[in-house]
Amino acid sequence: MLNRKEVHNSETLNIQIDSRDQKSYLIELSKDCTKFDLNVECLENSFSKFFILNHAESACELNINMVLKQDANCQMGVLDLEKSPLKWNHYVDLKEQGAEYEILSGQLCQEHIKKVCEMEVRHNAPHTNGQMKNFAVLFDYGQYQMIANGNIKKGCFDAQSHQATRVLTLGQGHKTKVIPLLLIDENDVKASHALTIGQPDADQLYYLQSRGLSTKQAVGLLSVGYFLPVIDLVEDEELKDSLRQEMESKVGLHGHQ
């Protein structure tokens, strides 16, 4: 069962996923949302999925705090296509062994709009797994900042911390600052980070234009790939189709934004 929540103005939501329970949440930051604090505790052997959709029309602050107990598994998606600033703080505590967490985010950064995120997945127990995958597309004068920190504490052997950030820059005047961090205080671990920032491949653009697409449509098609992995997390098929159409329109696939 999908639990839906609309957030208005400034709200705080506290959620506990009970032991061995399975829960899915769809949380929408409404047009008038200015601040949202989400605090989640995932108890032993629980499974949970969260999808946060930003529709705030003015500057918004998003604060997420997660605690995962033994063998808890949690997956989260964050989709932000709005032409409004977002300040996002994201902290995950893999508190007990066997805890697993994955975050996928997709953000569209439009003209003179700033998106800022500080993210940390902290391993406080052995046999824990943390995955961070962040994607962004920047138009003219868009601004994107992502600090992603995988933090493995001493004694957390057999922990895995992996992160990937992909940023597609379009047009001119954009600003990007991405800092991938790995703080490791244990030897027997697996950790990695991958980062790509840049313009679309010229050969790909040429091929798409040779197939009859305008420059804007070709760029839009390349942008789609940055958001689809996030949108695919949505369990409601009708909403998934709606979000895909909204995303395709905003990246210019249909010839306009």
Image (cartoon, helix red, strand yellow):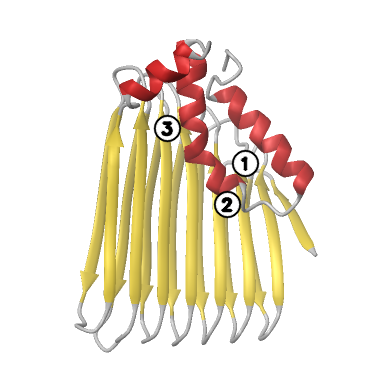
Give the residue type at disc 3. Val
Q: Amino acid at mark 2?
A: Phe
Q: Answer with mark 2 or mark 3, whichever residue precedes in sequence.
A: 2
Badge 2 element: strand
Q: Which residue is mark 2?
A: 36
Instruction: Name the one closer to the observer, 225 or 121.
Output: 225
For the residue pair 182 and 209, the one nearer the viewer reads as 209
Give coordinates of residue 165: x percent, y percent.
Answer: 35, 48
Residue 149 place in picture, x, y as percent:
30, 61
- Specify the quadrant that holds the N terminus: bottom right
Q: Is residue 199 left or right of residue 25?
A: left
Q: Is residue 124 above or below residue 66?
A: below
From where the camera sits, is residue 83 visible? yes
Q: Position of residue 255 (x, y in %)?
A: 57, 13
The residues tagged by marks 2 and 1 sit, at their Cα atoms, a distance apart of 7 Å
Give the residue number, with chain letter if any, for mark 1.
33
Q: Are marks 2 and 1 in contact (CB under 8 Å)?
A: yes
Residue 166 higher or lower than 66, as above or below: above
Foreground mark, 3 or 1? Answer: 3
Query: Marks 3 and 1, Cα distance to the nearest angstrom?
Result: 23 Å
As shown in the figure, which amino acid type bears the numbered disc 1? Cys
Question: Residue 108 location in percent, x, y?
Answer: 48, 33
Would you name the residue on which mark 3 appears? Answer: 137
Helix, strand or loop at mark 1:
loop
User: From where the camera sits, is residue 12 visible?
Assistant: no
